[in-house]
Image (cartoon, rainbow, N blue to C red):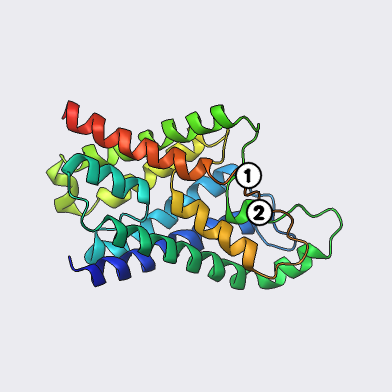
Amino acid sequence: MSNGDVFLGEVIGTAILILFGAGVVAAVVLNYSKAKDAGWVVIAFGWGFGVLAGAYTAAPLSGGHLNPAVTVGIAVDTGDWDQVPVYIAGQMAGAMLGAVLCWLTYYAQFRANAEDELAQPTLGIFATAPAIRNPVANLVTEIIATVGLVLPILAFGLTKGLGESGTAVLVVAFLVVGIGLSLGGPTGYAINPARDLGPRIVHTLLPIPNKGTSDWGYAWIPVAGPLIGGALSGVIFNAAF
């Protein structure tokens, strides 16, 4: 795959991922949304479908990593780091684009949300935050949850039938739903540095009325945790398989 194809594929795929993922959170939490208060299960499935749509779209161009933790895990396992910067650049650009598209889609709801004195801040639509703020515990959660994502993805590659049938991405999408349902409670399961950092940057820059803080003091955890988890996954997979 050429660098151009990799970059373009990751931009498009990650933008779709974030549009669906941030979009489902916006649908559930913003006032005057028809999906208001639909709940955590809806959010988990929305993110899973975002992975499904984004990865299938990007797969012919880049393989559909959509996540620096996945890219790092593969690089650690294979020893091939040549295109890692291209993958991560595309993922970051795509994540920011997807966040902007989400904002445009729900523009009227963002405006209405700002006019409600009881409305919650909007950062949770774009980025993650812990239920209990404990940096060590939060970091460990993100590391474990990311290993729960990346290690199975690496192992799925050993099952030829998944690749030949085209169902590998579908299985990964359900894996993401499972992680959200089982491991998402403590930190909101970033499990993807680009997914958190790109939209957090956009939240800082966008003219969202009454948007509140972008919580940059916490922002390093959903970046460092998934990167550590991805690297550990590559080490474990290389040693065990």
Q: Quadrant of residue 138?
A: top right
**How would you rate the neighbour count of disc 2 (Cα within 10 Å): few for under 14, some for 14-19, many for 20 or more?**
many
Q: CA distance from mark 2 to mark 1?
A: 9 Å
Q: Quadrant of the C terminus?
A: top left
Up-down relation of residue 234 to residue 211 (above or below): above
The answer to which of 72 and 174 lies nearer the viewer is: 72
| Whether residue 190 can be seen here | no
Choose mark 2 or mark 1, whichever is in front: 1
Q: Quadrant of the N terminus?
A: bottom left
Q: Please tell me which residue is depicted at 39% across the width and 42% down the height of the picture.
A: 227
The label number, if any, that marks residue 214 in the structure image: 2
Q: Please tell me which residue is depicted at 47% across the width and 36% down the height of the picture.
A: 142
Q: Using residue 92 as the reference point, say whether residue 22 is left or right of it.
A: right
Local SS, label 2: loop
The label number, if any, that marks residue 217 in the structure image: 1
Position of residue 148 measured from the top left corner of the image (x, y, whole percent) = 37, 34
What's under tag 1, amino acid-wise?
Answer: Gly
Find out whether the residues at labels 2 and 1 contact each other: C-beta distance under 8 Å. Answer: no
Q: Please tell me which residue is depicted at 30% across the width and 50% down the height of the picture.
A: 71
Local SS, label 1: loop
What's under tag 2, amino acid-wise?
Answer: Ser
Up-down relation of residue 240 to residue 220 (above or below): above
Position of residue 145 measured from the top left corner of the image (x, y, whole percent) = 43, 34
Q: Quadrant of residue 59?
A: bottom left
Toward the right, the furthest residue is 117
| Whether residue 62 can be seen here | yes
